[in-house]
Image (tube, rainbow, N blue to C red):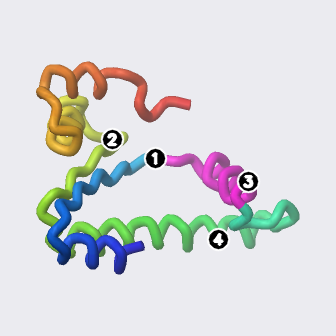
């Protein structure tokens, strides 16, 4: 995916990227991994824990790689961030007024 992003950014297209950083619990991440076929249903607890550590490390490395790439229009929406910070990212990414972005950011975007 990263290579495609780099190719699009190098082209004449305007590439807008919104990275969404969610704080998934281990149980949520394990269930999603099983649901999409990344993890087997019979995966033992120790193997699952090692898998989840690897998956989380991959998320961090991918995020760092995207952040270090110097994309001009990269915005980040973080679950742990202040709603105003997320509103600024949403306003930039969606090209909407900050007031509208604040209304969106005030919703439970990261809820179940």
Label located before the other in sequence (2 or 4): 4
Q: Nearer the viewer, mark 1 or mark 3?
A: 3
Residue 82, image quadrant: top left
Q: Is residue 71 visible?
A: yes
Residue 14: image location, x then y, percent: 17, 60
Q: With 51 as the anchor, is 9 left or right in this view?
A: left
Q: State the CA–CA distance, disc 1 to disc 4.
A: 17 Å
Q: State the CA–CA distance, disc 2 to disc 4.
A: 24 Å
Residue 12: image location, x then y, percent: 15, 70
Circles 1 and 2 in contact, beta carbons < 8 Å: yes
Circles 1 and 4 in contact, beta carbons < 8 Å: no
Q: Residue at x 37, y 22 (%)?
A: 107
Q: Secondary structure at mark 2?
A: loop
Q: Which mark is residue 80?
A: 2
The residue carrying mark 4 is 51
Dot 3, crowdedness within 10 Å: few (<14), some or many (≥20)? few
Dot 4, crowdedness within 10 Å: few (<14), some or many (≥20)? some
Circles 1 and 3 in contact, beta carbons < 8 Å: no
How many numbered discs? 4
Q: Residue furthest front?
A: 12
Label located before the other in sequence (3 or 4): 3
Residue 103: image location, x then y, percent: 26, 19
The residue carrying mark 1 is 23
Q: State the CA–CA distance, disc 3 to disc 4.
A: 15 Å
């Amino acid at each position: 995916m990263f290579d495609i992003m780099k190719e699009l950014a190098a082209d004449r297209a305007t590439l807008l990227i919104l990275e969404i950083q969610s704080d998934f619990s281990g149980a949520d991440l394990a269930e999603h991994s099983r649901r999409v076929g990344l993890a087997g249903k019979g995966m033992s607890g120790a193997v699952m824990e090692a898998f989840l550590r690897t998956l989380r490390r991959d998320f961090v490395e991918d995020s760092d790689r995207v952040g270090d790439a110097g994309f001009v229009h990269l915005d980040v929406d973080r679950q742990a961030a202040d709603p105003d910070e997320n509103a600024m990212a949403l306003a930039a990414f969606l090209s909407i007024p900050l007031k509208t972005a604040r209304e969106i950011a005030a919703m439970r975007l990261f809820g179940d």
